[in-house]
Image: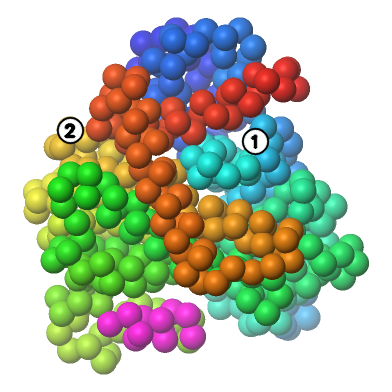
Amino acid sequence: MAFKNQYLADLMETVKKRNPGEPEFHQAVTEVLESLEPVIEKHPEYIKMGVLESIVEPERIIKFRVPWVDDKGNVQVNRGFRIQFNSAIGPYKGGLRFHPSVYEGIIKFLGFEQIFKNSLTGLPIGGGKGGSDFDPKGKSDMEVMRFCQSFMTELAKHIGPDTDVPAGDIGVGGREIGYLFGQYKRLRDEYSGVLTGKGLTYGGSLARTEATGYGLCYYTEEMLNDHDDSFKGKTVVISGSGNVAIFATQKATALGAKVVALSDSNGYIHDPDGIDLDAVKEIKLVKRGRIKEYVENHPNATYTEGCRGIWTIPCDIALPCATQNELDEEGAKALIAHGVKAVCEGANMPSTPEAVHAFQSAGVLFGPAKAANAGGVATSALEMSQNSMRYSWSFEEVDAKLHDIMKNIYHNSAKAAKEYGMEGNLVAGANIAGFLKVANAMLAQGVC
Ligand code: NDP
């Protein structure tokens, strides 16, 4: 879509020139700036004070070498990144991704999205993201530990409980957070909430592991309730089989739906009887195996090589929970043809712009990632609060707060969309609601 507003068109051109070869970042910025057209028409002060120019430029980019020794005694060298994007409303907060596809553009897109997502939670957290092109898949625990120790040896210079608080993301789960935390503590001689997603024995929060998947379902249920509908009796397709997908499957099932499909980066399983989640947890979380192993003990289930075909499975609700741009226009059209009612994004930017457009044009309820998957970072912020208090809340207390936060995110986004003349457009609503809080904080703090 072309910008009607010349100022925004020029700004987008500058972003592309300044960040060449980073299509994911361009995609994320384009989507936000498109939503902000009516906002800057109403609030020219944001232009005058350079708020938009500042918000698309990271406050700081840290890029470093990560050397480590593998089990055969060979030296390996990876690249590490931390992008501290915006600290207007709180310390930088956002996960670390370890995946071979990681480069500066991926971290920039994720860090940019994180600014608005964190703002939507209503909690005092700024936006940041980091990671490495290291692939934990197929590595031994000792190799992962040596990599994490080397990564943290540099990262520790730039983070802190009141400065920048990383967490997990793709390829960074409880094991990696543990090794990273251990190294930070050793280097700084400090026991603080510098990372979230920690284990329960050393400062983690109950319900953090479940939070992104549960939060996604709370948001989706609220959206459905607002349209006199619910998960009850629905057929659901979920992509991925990692942290987000597993706990989205658990909560959707608890809310009365039947989840019939999951995937990994090799292919997808379809189980018309409903996914046996204990079997998936055993394969993915305990054995770190492949999703195709599921069909060995589930005779009615099928496995198909390749990920994209998952969207051809008929369903009422689709929850993409794997990775960016995994759901394209073809996938969207297949879902629409089978009568999908709602699509909510568990992964970050899983739908291409063409897919989003197809859903919106077909009247499918569409919940964008920065709103729908904000439950993870919201609960991370609750972990920070508990660490500061040196106290911990029960699972039920954290889960109840998460539930409230997700309901509020849905209603605040819906309200903002309506207020700016785009009723029902939850993409625009999330971008506007997230932006306004950060932009006003930036205005209040002056040019800095
Ligand atoms: P995990 O590493 O736990 O799992 C990722 C899953 O996605 C794996 O099953 C992986 O398969 C699969 N996958 C990767 N690429 C593809 C692909 N092209 N097609 C199908 N499946 C694929 O990561 P998370 O569950 O933590 O993260 C998933 C998404 O959710 C990411 O976009 C992340 O940024 C986002 N997110 C995560 C949050 C969290 O709290 N963890 C918070 C907010 C957002 P394989 O095993 O083959 O690699």
Mark 1 Cα shell of 10 Å, populated few (<14), some (14-19), many (≥20): many
Camera-nearest residue between 74 and 243: 243
The span from disc 2 to disc 1 (Cα, nearest Å) is 35 Å
Residue visible at 35% across and 56% down in the picture: 218
Question: Which residue is tagged 2?
Answer: 361
Residue 309 seen: no
In the image, residue 77 above or below residue 349? below
Camera-nearest residue between 201 and 272: 201
Of labels 2 and 1, the one closer to you: 1
Horizontal side of residue 146 vs 344, given as left or right = right
In the image, residue 325 above or below residue 444? below
Residue visible at 41% across and 57% down in the picture: 403
Q: Quadrant of the N terminus?
A: top left
In the image, residue 366 above or below residue 159? above
Where are the magenta residues, as a range? 276-286
Mark 2 Cα shell of 10 Å, populated few (<14), some (14-19), many (≥20): few
Residue type, label 1? Ile
Residue type, label 2? Ser
Residue visible at 22% across and 44% down in the picture: 226
> Residue 443: which quarter of the image?
top right
For the rendered model, the colour scheme is rainbow
